[in-house]
């Protein structure tokens, strides 16, 4: 590079780049001229702007004044001048459009296509349907064909007449049996003009196609029309779309032969069904509580519910570790409401890990409260509680529903405002205890220790803890460490009924296959979990797919 020259790196939007050497005293106009003479993107689109760091360069700016650092480049952005964007109609009015030789070629091709269709129609054997086909093409098709010819004749006046002419030559429509038409080229379409005009005669004579006789190779072979997606090679995952209802055993065999045919199922554990184990309502329950339970459809309890109610009313810390939907909420709602009805000063605190669980529990509590015909104030105290309602809740609520974060941020720092509740606290219910693990579990454990110290040392209350958790290996040790308790009674003998269960240990492959062709952007990869859930829903085994 000669002295006093600068090398400028220019890049187009399509990724192509070049290096231009110009004198420092040259202008951006000279740079554009050099690009038009040597850079293909500038030759294809001679009208372009140059941008540096998002700023358009002025044509009179000198090259030496451009602040182009190491590794930086100038971007070439083409544009269309307004004078070149006139519509074909306006250009026709100005007399700037002349007849192109391509229009005669298009007309010749169109006439040839029409003659081919006419020859095909003339070869239809004489039958009762021949008159219908002739009537259709003689009445509606002539006007429709004339409009198609008008559209084809306007191709030459379009700014894209080159591509339109090529499209017409590339289009090939082959009549098939019935209503099936195989379209060889569907990526591009000709200008359609006013399609509503052509659609009208087709609707009026739509029955003519149904009455036309079947002919040709397709009808002779009895083959249906070929769909694009049907030609895609389907994997084992996508070919399994049966919607017949399967039992658990049939579903396991179905998975072995389908998704798991490569040995993904490592182990199958069969858990037998379990009959319900009932117990009568405890004798120490009040008559109002018994009537309230009967009004909501509970005439007797499961064995684990009866034992949990008896132990918690006796003042023992309880941990209920039974399966999902086994009625754990009754294990703490009954003793809490029974105690609050008998002692008008007693209070209870419910702690849930999420606001959604708190709202769900509030609905069930209000249902039981209405059945008891009691005026116990049950309220949620969390971040969504309006500030104007918090004072009333602190002064009147007897059953407070909250979460660990609110307990840490609002209740314990201002425990003096909750003196009435904390001094008369009879029960602390902690649901979903298995979710308190890791950092969240450590923080909650420290919060519960603070709560116990405040209740014991300041207000002299010693509440009873009731934990509910899913089945785990060590539920008793977990809740004892969570609340720093010396002894907890574990109730894990589930009295609720259970059907026969299959547990499959699934070892997925190292890769995730993609359904269908890799060129089809509409088909996405799916995990084995979602595939199995989809199959189970189709078979009627699942109603929804649980996702965490």
Image (spheres, rainbow, N blue to C red):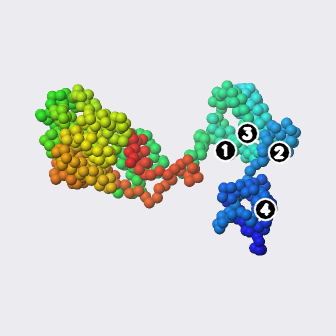
- Residue 426 in percent (x, y) is at 19, 40
- Residue 282 in percent (x, y) is at 14, 35
Q: Which residue is mark 4?
A: 27
- Residue 313 in percent (x, y) is at 15, 40
Say which quadrant the N terminus sits in: bottom right
Q: How many marks?
A: 4
> Mark 1 packing: few (<14 Cα in 10 Å), some, or many (20+)?
few
Give the Cα separation between the discs numbered 4 and 3: 45 Å
Mark 2 or 4: in front is 4
Question: For the residue labelled by badge 4, is the local secondary structure a helix, a strand or a loop?
Answer: loop
Q: Are marks 4 and 3 in contact (CB under 8 Å)?
A: no
- Work out whether mark 1 precedes mark 4 in sequence or the reverse, and give the earlier one: 4
Q: Is residue 486 visible?
A: yes
Q: Which residue is mark 1?
A: 186
Q: Which residue is mark 3?
A: 191
Above or below 507: residue 246 = above
Residue depicted at 75% across the width and 64% down the height: 63
- Work out whether mark 2 precedes mark 3 in sequence or the reverse, and give the earlier one: 2
Above or below 420: residue 447 = below
Residue depicted at 32% across the width and 45% down the height: 410
Who is closer to the viewer here, 57 or 128? 57
Q: Is residue 330 visible?
A: no
> Mark 3 packing: few (<14 Cα in 10 Å), some, or many (20+)?
some
Q: Which residue is mark 2?
A: 102
Mark 4 or 3: in front is 4
């Amino acid at each position: 590079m000669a002295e006093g020259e600068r090398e400028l790196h220019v890049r187009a939007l399509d990724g192509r780049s070049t290096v231009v050497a110009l004198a420092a005293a040259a202008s951006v106009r000279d740079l554009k001229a050099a690009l038009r003479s040597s850079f293909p993107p500038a030759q294809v689109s001679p009208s372009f702007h140059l941008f540096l760091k998002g700023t358009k360069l002025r044509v009179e700016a000198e090259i030496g004044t451009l602040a182009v650092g190491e590794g930086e480049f100038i971007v070439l952005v083409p544009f269309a001048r307004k004078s070149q964007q006139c519509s074909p109609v306006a250009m026709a009015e100005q007399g700037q459009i002349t007849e192109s030789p391509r229009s005669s070629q298009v007309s010749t091709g169109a006439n040839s296509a029409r003659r081919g269709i006419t020859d095909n129609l003339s070869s239809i054997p004489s039958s009762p349907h021949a008159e219908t086909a002739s009537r259709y093409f003689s009445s509606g098709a002539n006007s429709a064909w004339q409009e198609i010819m008008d559209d084809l004749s306007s191709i030459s006046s379009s700014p894209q007449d080159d591509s339109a002419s090529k499209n017409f030559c590339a289009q090939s429509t082959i009549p098939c049996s019935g209503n099936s038409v195989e379209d060889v080229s569907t990526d591009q379409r000709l200008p359609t003009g006013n399609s509503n005009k052509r659609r009208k005669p087709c609707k009026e004579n739509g029955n003519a196609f149904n009455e036309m006789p079947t002919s040709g190779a397709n009808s002779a072979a009895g083959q249906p029309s070929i769909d694009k997606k049907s030609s895609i090679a389907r994997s084992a995952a996508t070919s399994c779309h049966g919607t017949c209802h399967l039992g658990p055993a049939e579903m396991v065999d179905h998975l072995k032969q389908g998704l798991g045919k490569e040995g993904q199922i490592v182990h199958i554990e069969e858990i037998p069904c379990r009959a319900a184990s009932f117990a009568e309502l405890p004798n120490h329950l009040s008559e109002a509580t018994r009537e309230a339970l009967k009004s909501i459809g509970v005439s007797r309890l499961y064995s684990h519910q009866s034992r949990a109610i008896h132990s918690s009313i006796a003042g023992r810390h309880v941990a209920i570790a039974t399966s999902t939907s086994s009625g754990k909420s009754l294990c703490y709602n009954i003793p809490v409401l029974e105690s609050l009805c008998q002692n008008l000063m007693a209070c209870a605190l419910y702690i849930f890990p999420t606001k959604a669980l708190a709202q769900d529990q509030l609905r069930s509590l209000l249902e039981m409260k209405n059945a008891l015909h009691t005026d116990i104030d049950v309220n949620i105290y969390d971040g969504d509680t309006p500030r104007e309602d918090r004072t009333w809740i602190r002064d009147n609520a007897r059953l407070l529903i909250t979460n660990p974060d609110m307990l840490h941020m609002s209740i314990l720092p201002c425990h003096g405002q909750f003196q009435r509740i904390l001094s008369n606290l009879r029960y602390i219910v902690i649901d979903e205890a298995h979710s308190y693990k890791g950092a969240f579990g450590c923080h909650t454990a420290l919060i519960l220790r603070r709560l116990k110290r405040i209740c014991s040392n300041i207000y002299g209350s010693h509440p009873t803890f009731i934990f509910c958790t899913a089945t785990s290996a060590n539920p008793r040790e977990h809740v004892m460490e969570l609340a720093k308790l010396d002894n907890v009674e574990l109730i894990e003998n589930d009295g609720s009924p259970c059907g026969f269960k299959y547990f499959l240990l699934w070892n997925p492959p190292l890769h995730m296959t993609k359904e269908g062709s890799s060129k089809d952007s509409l088909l996405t990869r799916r995990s084995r979990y979602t595939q199995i859930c989809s199959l189970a829903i189709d078979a009627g085994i699942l109603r929804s797919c649980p996702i965490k």
